[in-house]
Amino acid sequence: MNELIRTLTQTWGPTSYEEGIRGVITRELDSLHMDCRVDALGNLIYCIPASGKPKLLVSAHMDQIGIIITHVDKDGFLRFGAVGGLDPYKVLGHRFVFANGTLGVAAVESKEHKTLEHLTLDKLFLDIGAVSKDDALLHVAVGDFAVYAGDCVQVGNRVTSAALDDRIGCYVLIEALKAAVGKELNYETYAMFSVQEEIGIKGAKVGAWGVQPDLAIALDVTAWGDTPESYVLDIGLGKGPAIKVKDAGMVATPAIRDLLIEAAKTHGIPFQLEVLQGGTTDAAAIQTIANGVPTGVISIPDRYVHSASEMVDIGDVEDCIKLLVAVLLK
Ligand SMILES: [Zn+2]
């Protein structure tokens, strides 16, 4: 098991509480001695200067989806809402953990048991083992955030964990920086570990304004079409990085899409083309800031996105690193 991937996925960091994961990343990259700043929203932005060269921004988001407590009832059960995209049927039966370590189980009202297709989050509650409202309030409060609890494990040549969206993108960016620092680069390179992607791409928009890049690439996960009776989607695990053509929020700038395709072909890196009907990434926000930024996306195929057990292929992850490094290095 790759220990950095484990640490990245196991660090608590729902949207707008990214300081823990920011700490993991800064410690990991400390020895590279890159210029680094944190903006007012919390985006962590590194720069590898290369004066006179175009400014490339590469972004991966640090935040993860979660839940927020909306109500504590008289018996100590907690009601909750979503922070980011959360399907009730993916939540049911899973454990959640708060910043202070308090754990709870997401259960459903008994009378809802047979109507899973109509399940809504308001029919679920969190059981933290409290015996009363006062007991519960010793551990949590309305407005507290929690994220999926659970280990990061390897199964075959794959890794399964919550929060691979988008800690695996952070991992790709970290490893690409390690490979690129000290070498001759094609671009003045800005590496942004962004905040608040899951609630509407807040961080990347602000961070990109701060950098004002000439071109940009986002690193994020994408969906899959290779499990039983899955949606029709030409993306599978183990087939290489997915180079985005379009998702629900953007058309990738054709010149950047083609730059990524050419880099993959030149270096013999397998790739697939991504046309995703739902969801988007930091790239959608970055593309439309300032005077506009030609922007593309390297996507990591990720089964069961936004569940407690997402799954990526280790070979795909390694090929995403290779592809990004191929773009960065002269
Ligand atoms: Zn994501």
Image (cartoon, rainbow, N blue to C red):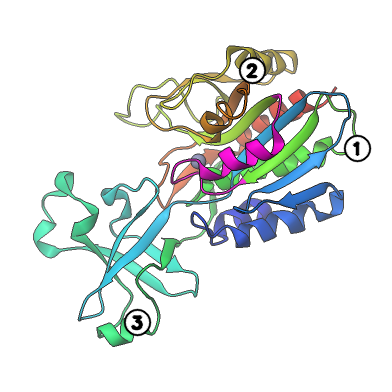
**Residue at point 62% right, 34% down?**
315
Q: Which of marks 2 and 1 is in front?
A: 2
Q: Is residue 193 visible?
A: yes
> For numbered disc 2, what is the local secondary structure?
helix
**Disc on res. 137:** 3
Indicate the quadrant where residue 298 lies: top right
**Disc on res. 88:** none
Residue 230, position as x, y percentages in the image: 32, 29
117 left or right of 96? Answer: left
> How far apart are labels 3 and 2 at the CA level?
51 Å
183 left or right of 144? Answer: right
Instruction: Of the two numbered discs 2 and 1 on the same chain, state the one appearing first in sequence.
Output: 1
Q: What residue type is labelled 2?
A: Ile
> For numbered disc 3, what is the local secondary structure?
helix
The answer to if 160 sits in the magenta stretch is no
**Residue at point 44% right, 67% down?**
97
> How far apart are labels 3 and 1 at the CA level?
52 Å
Image: magenta residue range: 194-214
293 left or right of 305? Answer: right
Instruction: Of the two numbered discs 3 and 2 on the same chain, state the one appearing first in sequence.
Output: 3
Q: Does the residue labelled 1 lie within 8 Å of ligand 1?
A: no
**Disc on res. 182:** 1
Instruction: Specify the quadrant that holds the C terminus.
Output: top right
267 left or right of 164? Answer: right
Q: In this view, does 147 lie above or below 229?
A: below
**Disc on res. 256:** 2
- Mark 2 crowd level (few <14, some 14–19, many ≥20, 10 Å Cα): many
Residue 319, position as x, y percentages in the image: 66, 30
Q: Which of marks 3 and 1 is in front?
A: 3
